[in-house]
Image (cartoon, grey):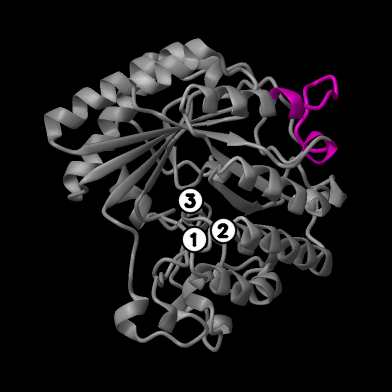
Amino acid sequence: MNSRYYGRQCDCACATHESPNILSVWLHLTERCNLRCAYCYLPHSRSDMSLETGYAAADAAFRSAVNHGYDEILFKYAGGEPLLCVENMSKLHRYAQTLAKKHNILIDGVVLSNGTLLTPEIIEQLSLLNLRLMISLDGIGTFHDCQRYYPDGQGSFDAVSKATDLAMSYHLIPDISVTISGRNIAGLPELTAWLSERNLPFSFNFYRENNRSASEKDLRLEEDKFIKGLLSAYKVIESHLNQRILSFPLADHADFGIPHLRPCSVGHSYLVFDHQGHVAKCQMDMGNVITDIFHADPLSQIRIRSNGIQNISVDEKEECQECQWRYWCAGGCPLLTYRATGYFNRKSPNCNIYKAIYSEIARLKELPISP
């Protein structure tokens, strides 16, 4: 951490950092899910990725990794609920491991799950494959249940909390993904304390409105209420301060480790394969198909095609030029900005929230950590 970067205009040397030499690959294993979360952007059809398609997607990912000189590939196994396809997922990751050895490329993998289907047997499979686990948990009790529930309306908190404890009992420490919306922001301090007391790594992600969730008006972010809830959660973090907590994003993917030009790797070092083998730039925009698994180098098409998300540099956003925090938020999610403004080169609709909380995050990052 380098405090001299916080809260000032960064010079070119520190402000031109791009993502590490890692190609991120999202594999959309299934459209199926046993939950019906309020903010989900998926249609919940009963379609799965076949093994044949999965193998072809892995082949395509490695072709692009080799062509563009990547040292490592991160596979994100997602859905729907990927644990509904755990056997195919295991076979696919073993295949990817074989390709990694063949091409002398490092491989990492994470399963993005709601946690409700986790069992000791699944944990054993994940551990044998060296797969990490990310579980979505949005609050304690009703603050989780109000937006992550089963088709019959029953909340999933009890199942998710038990899954988290189960994973930890088998020494598989899950990363916790927290989606914050207008519905659960009031419960964020309580959840932060719950996670901190268990020494669990977690990240705060802001709700992003989509076509399927647009009618859920109470999910939207009210700036004052949102800022108040986040600052209260940061006070809890300060009382439980440790390196694991501070290593994860505490504000919607903002990276306080080093200045950066883009908020994510979409459009540059990111491939999204849907269950049919189509390739898109972002999992939240899979309808904008760029190419497919049979292209010799899908990443080249992701980079040159003008349709879909344009993840431009924050230096190209005129409204961001005078902001002292522009190299930390990097302009925010480009898809969110486009849906709110109709443009990719405008500042994020969450700009005021970022400005109100970043100084506090920067302060937390600089505090001494007791051994």
Which numbered marker is on residue 241? 2
Near mark 1 (Cα within 10 A), the count class, few <14, some 14-19 or many ≥20, is few
Asked if the residues shown at circle 2 and circle 1 are in contact, with their CB atoms under 8 angstroms apart, the answer is yes
Sequence-first disc among 2 and 1: 2
Mark 2 secondary-structure assignment: loop
Label 1, label 3: how far apart the Cα atoms are: 12 Å
Please tell me whether residue 124 is drawn above or below residue 142 in the rendered image: above
- The range drawn in magenta is 142-159
* Residue at the (78%, 63%) spot, across then down: 226
Q: Is residue 6 left or right of residue 55?
A: right
Q: Nearer the viewer, residue 200 or 92?
A: 200
> Of the residues tagged 1 and 3, which is closer to the observer?
1
Q: Earlier in the sequence, mark 1 or mark 3?
A: 3
In percent of width and height, residue 94 lies at: 29, 19
Closer-to-camera residue (180/42): 180
Q: CA distance from mark 3 to mark 2?
A: 9 Å
What is the residue that sits farthest to the front in this orientation?
A: 371
Q: Amino acid at mark 2?
A: Leu
Look at discs 2 and 1 and give the one toward the viewer: 1
Q: Determine the residue positioned at 39% across, 54% down.
A: 305
Residue at left offset 69%, top offset 68%: 349
Q: Is 1 left or right of 288, judged from the image as shown?
A: left
Dot in front, 3 or 2: 2
Q: Amino acid at mark 3?
A: Arg
Question: Residue 122 location in percent, x, y?
Answer: 48, 15
Alpha carbon distance from label 2 to label 1:
8 Å
The residue where tag 3 is placed is 244
User: In the depicted view, which residue is nearer to us: 220 or 273?
Assistant: 220
Placement of the N terminus among the 4 image quadrants: bottom left
For mark 2, does the 10 Å Cα neighbourhood hold few (<14), some (14 to 19), or many (20 or more) residues? many
Amino acid identity at mark 1: Ser
Residue where numbered disc 1 is placed? 370
